[in-house]
Amino acid sequence: MERENIALPDGALGAIRFGSIGLGLALIAATFWAGWSGDDKTAKIALHAYHIGFIYALGLALGAMGFVMIFHQTNAGWSAALRRQFENVMASIWAPAGLFAFLVLMQWAYMTHFKDGDAFLFSWMNTAKYGNDHLLEKKAAYLNVPFFTVRAAAYFIIWIGLAGALYHFSTRQDTDADPRHSYNARKLSSVGLIAFAFTVAFAGFDWLMGLDFHWYSTMFGVYFFAGNAVSSVALVLLICVLLRKFGRMVGHYTEDHQHDMSKLLFAFTVFWAYIGFSQYFLIWYANIPEETAYYLVRKEPGTIWEKLSWALPIGHFILPFLFLLPRPRRRSMGWAALWAVWMLVMHALDLFYVVRPEAGDKFHWADVTGILGPILVMIGFVASRVAANPLIPVNDPRLAESLGHKNYV
Amino acid sequence: MTTLQPDQAAALGLVSHKPRSEYVDPATIDGTLIDDPGKRAPLVLGNRDFHSVTNTICGWIENKTPKWWPMAFIISAHIAGIGTLAILYLIITGVGVWGLQRPVMWGWDIVNFVWWVGIGHAGTLISAILCLLKQKWRVSINRFAEAMTIFAVICAGTFPGIHVGRVWMAWMLFPLPNMNWIWPNFRSPLLWDVFAVGTYFTVSLLFWYMGMIPDLATMRDRVTARREQKTTLGPIWAPHPLPGFIKNLTITLPLNKIGSWVYGFLSLGWRFSNRHWNNYEKAYLLLAGVSTPLVLSVHSVVSFDFAVSIIPGWHTTIFPPYFVAGAIFSGFAMVLTLLIPARELYPGMKDFVTARTIENMCKIITVTGSMVGFAYMMEFFIAWYGANEFEQQTFVRRAFGPYWWAYWTMVLCNVISPQVFWFKWARTSIPFIFVITIFVNIGMWFERFVIITTLSADFLPSAWRYYRASAVDVATYIGSLGIFMTLFLLFCRFIPMLAISEVKGVMKQADPHAHDHHHGNGHGNGHANGHTKGAH
């Protein structure tokens, strides 16, 4: 009985794993085909849509990795029982790595297919159009293809290395019960968090801020992290509630853990709003041309971006803030799961808002397939991780403390 | 031994009869964090019971004034006096006595303002955010840190007030209706400062006072029991021989009666009833929730003072979270700067403010210091990436221009020095920690100095000028330190420095599920407080 509670049967989640990955790949293929068979404008849309999905998948893994390292670094007791779910999402970093490789392939294919067209994800790569741009000349030492490639490779090596080592420590402990793994994980996390801070910030600069190479904001790395933190907490919360719904982790994921997960979701929702507001507000107030261009596009009256400019503060902050504020709603698994889903959707809208305006305001069905494809692949990877190991780190030295966790007051 | 009052005996830690090893794991006898991930160091050491906790903490107030206290108080009060004179001179003469001159129109005054507001962040972070995060180690330092917050914000508030030049017009900072229909500029971040700092001060003061009510009531009960005892002060000690009639002068005052009245008034009729505790806990949690956004908002608004402008080096979007991290960084450093001597001077304090507490604080200093370092690097990178020549020039000038010494002092103190706390020996060596906290205090002052000296090279090169502070600037700054220390020493002398009830809440005896139901010797001795509290 006990074993059933903390593990899924062999071959479980098969439908989700294969169905999700299969469907995801099919959608990605359709997206690619849409761009290939259309004109260069459609190709650009397909690239941007796929990029949103890729960043979404990557953000889930990165956010979860940040939490795992923070839990280790702070020697957190309450979270020990549910850390495994964060680790499952973290260890799925291979999915975004593969998705990125496909992105490179896609960009290369379109580049050769539309020789004179504007089928570029990063406009600075389009030397035909921007070769004489004054700002690009100034930034050429950073924004060039070889250095960009080296950086991307370095990010993934660091992330995969960190995720692999942390996952290894945790799963090895399941079998050998050696508390030294926890100690090692803590040591690694201290250095890991520093590497994480820089790689995430620069990945944000490279892959999101760099979409419009004229624009810059010192805050952007933090903004990228804030969004990832929200989406990864929401996903893990959802996984835990679903596992509970199917009769697992009873007594391991209690109402008190639920309460704390909701608090994390709430806190990072507010954090995202704080960072987003500060960035917008300072740019709006100073009103200097090189910065406001970014928001000018997104506040163009009558466009969908303008509507999103209203929808995001309301949907990504005000509504979840008001609904997650009362204690009973945070402790209720049903309500919290509902808001987790809501935040996952909102995070997609947020990325849509950041990425998509760079490809113009015409839409194509590839927008839907491009965004959903990579996300479905990621879900499939996470599901196979969930099925592969015990649902809790069974021999974690802090497990007893975590199981007895109570939220008094 | 016989000359000791009972409270003194408790304060000196002499009431612990039993060998320590009976309760405390020998590995954690000093409360340092142990590396074994499954174990937690105890929060209160020294085999204490509830009674001895009350006696020790109240003993610091009730016992004879320690010898160092009057000396420290006199020195601080004199320094505060110098500051007051400097301010008086400024008001009489005008703001010209400061080193301000075009183009540097914001000088030490704004540096001091931001520095003090930053220091004032630790208290609320410890009492509000760490409360919401259920970090129980905070209970031994929260009262202390909150007091520091209040005094730091008082010092901070002085500077913009006297910078307005015509101090008698400072009321116009507030949007008060007046006959001429003159309103402050609502789009000015300086007005937002008035609201942000004002709100922060009010809420922090309320939070501090509300948390203190049960302890003030404890003081009231204890002093009322000795109500009729009169206190004899004197004879006066002086370094030089005084005439006999002064030297032998003693004065007898009904201090206990006064104390009973004052503590009685301040404790607002608290009677330790269950209902009182229930309301107290609710209010505490609510105030913690209200204070948490304030910790972020105050320094974000202060950062807007700089960041909403279009001055190169000032306008950068990372300023709000970067200022908040820096504020927590400097606040924790200042708490440690004050806590470390207090821990040595007050007997028994080490049992509460354990090596574990100190070690945790060192770690927070490293984390926030690294965040600040991260922000410095982002600023530099984006200054280059933004490809704005003025921005780039500003940053090059910061590091290699006439103020290079300030910049590298800042980097050394803020980014490099806290990195030593990666090593356990550094986090456990008290004198070493003290030195580092001083470094951090200096570094955070220089951080703001580096920002304001950006002004010395504005868009018009013929106007460039090297900014120097005047003697009045220095005296005002030193004086604000004196005001701060004076207030702080008064706090140490008259208010329980540790939150008695909260400390009891994290003790082993308070845990209803503890395996040994050993409730200590203090149970049922008439001091009712603390017993009603469960795990907080």
Image (cartoon, coloured by chain):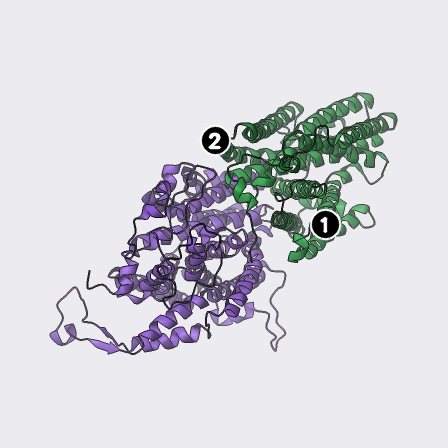
Can the viewer see residue A96?
A: yes
Q: Which mark is residue A334?
A: 1
Residue A379 vertical position relative to residue B451 in the rendered view, above or below: above
Residue B123 pos. (x, y %): 47, 56
Query: CB of mark 1 within 8 Å of CB of mark 2?
Result: no
Q: Nearer the viewer, residue A149 or A84?
A: A84
Q: Chain of mark 2?
A: A
- Amino acid at circle 1: Gly
**Letter of the chain shown purple in the rendering:** B
- Chain A colour is green
Q: Which mark is residue B112?
A: none
Say if labels 1 and 2 share a chain: yes
Q: Nearer the viewer, residue B118 or B449?
A: B118
Q: Residues within 10 Å of mark 1 (few under 14, many from 20)?
A: some
Residue at disc 1, secondary structure: helix
Is the C terminus of chain A in the top left, top right, bottom left or bottom right quadrant?
A: bottom right
In the picture as drawn, the residue positioned furthest to the front comes out as: A1
Question: Quadrant of residue B425 in the image?
Answer: top left
In the image, A208: left or right of B53?
Answer: right
Residue B295 vertical position relative to residue A397 in the rendered view, above or below: below
Q: Which residue is mark 2?
A: A180
Q: CA distance from mark 1 to mark 2?
A: 37 Å
Residue A295 vertical position relative to residue B266 in the rendered view, above or below: above
Residue B468 pos. (x, y %): 41, 51
